[in-house]
Amino acid sequence: MTEDFLTGVRETGLFDRLSVGVQSFDDSMLRKLNRRHSAAMAADAVRRAEMHGFVRLSVDLIYGLPGQGVTEWARELKEVERLNRSLLQPVEHLSCYALTVEPGTMLERQIESGRSEAPDEEVQVAQYGLLQRWIADNGYSQYEVSNYCRNGQRALHNCRYWNRTPYLGLGAAAHSFDGTRRRWNVADVARYTATATDGEVEHEEETLTQRDAYNEYVMTALRTTEGIVKEMVPPPYRTHLERAAKRYLHNGLLTDTGRCLKPTADGMLQADGMAAALFG
């Protein structure tokens, strides 16, 4: 993030929150991720953003990286503490993602060829547990599997995705949702720019069925601490949901508040598997 970029974004008057993709404060891990920045550059970017008036700052980190055990992850969290001490006020938001290996990526090829280790699920669970203890000790609260904030400062745009609130995406590859239809702009910047000047951006779109809407809501809601709000479930699927949720209520992965089906701490770790079982 250059000085010109930070100044220009602030001068628009449109943005008061900035998310910085640090990913790791360990240079060896950044090299494994094929990132161009260093740990020092990332920390400096956060500090410079604050100096330019961005008081609402978020930092992204990844755990479960090849060669990263619980001890190494603990050092990453210590670096967050160190960064916070260097700021006028602590970073208000953290996104901490467990590494997943996406098809067709360099990491997948490295794992297949034996040049890199595959993520260890048991290590990731232990790292997640350490993260839960750390946030409790450092003034953050969890509101989604991977997202944590101080003083209730949640990422509002993410919450819109999870509760199916309509949103508008601007720019190449941006996604929009009007409650029924989802559209996504062409990813190529040159093509996006060329069509945008004509008044109709090149895009694709899909119309969601009621079943699609239900399944998507269950998938995203189970990853949040609030869980599934029953009145948000389409009426034809409410009986199915109540029946399918019984075994998870029985084994302690869900709790029923009357208004919501909320994942427990253990349930958060199994949110994706539960969602698949609750799909319509």
Image: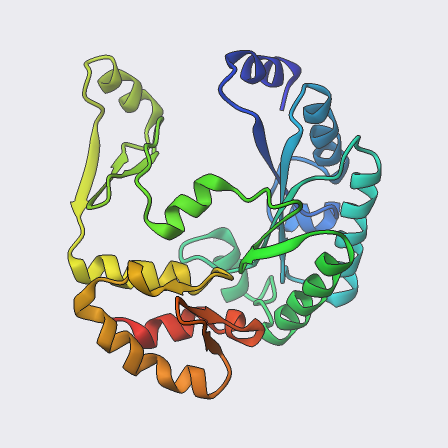
Q: Is residue 68 visible?
A: no
Q: Determine the residue positioned at 29% across, 23% down.
A: 192
Q: Position of residue 226 (x, y in %)?
A: 47, 61
Q: Is residue 151 left or right of residue 175?
A: right
Total numbered labels placed on residues in the image: 0
Does residue 197 sit above or below 231 in this rendering? Answer: above
Q: Determine the residue positioned at 64% across, 51% down.
A: 32
Q: Position of residue 96 (x, y in %)?
A: 61, 53
Q: Image quarter for residue 20? A: top right
Does residue 146 sit above or below 169 in this rendering? Answer: below
Q: Is residue 85 left or right of residue 110?
A: right
Q: Position of residue 115 (x, y in %)?
A: 60, 62
Q: Is residue 45 left or right of residue 245?
A: right
Q: Foreground residue, 248 or 208? A: 248
Q: Determine the residue positioned at 21% across, 27% down.
A: 202
Q: Foreground residue, 187 or 156? A: 156
Q: Position of residue 7 (x, y in %)?
A: 61, 13
- Point out the image quarter for the N terminus: top right
Q: Is residue 209 visible?
A: yes
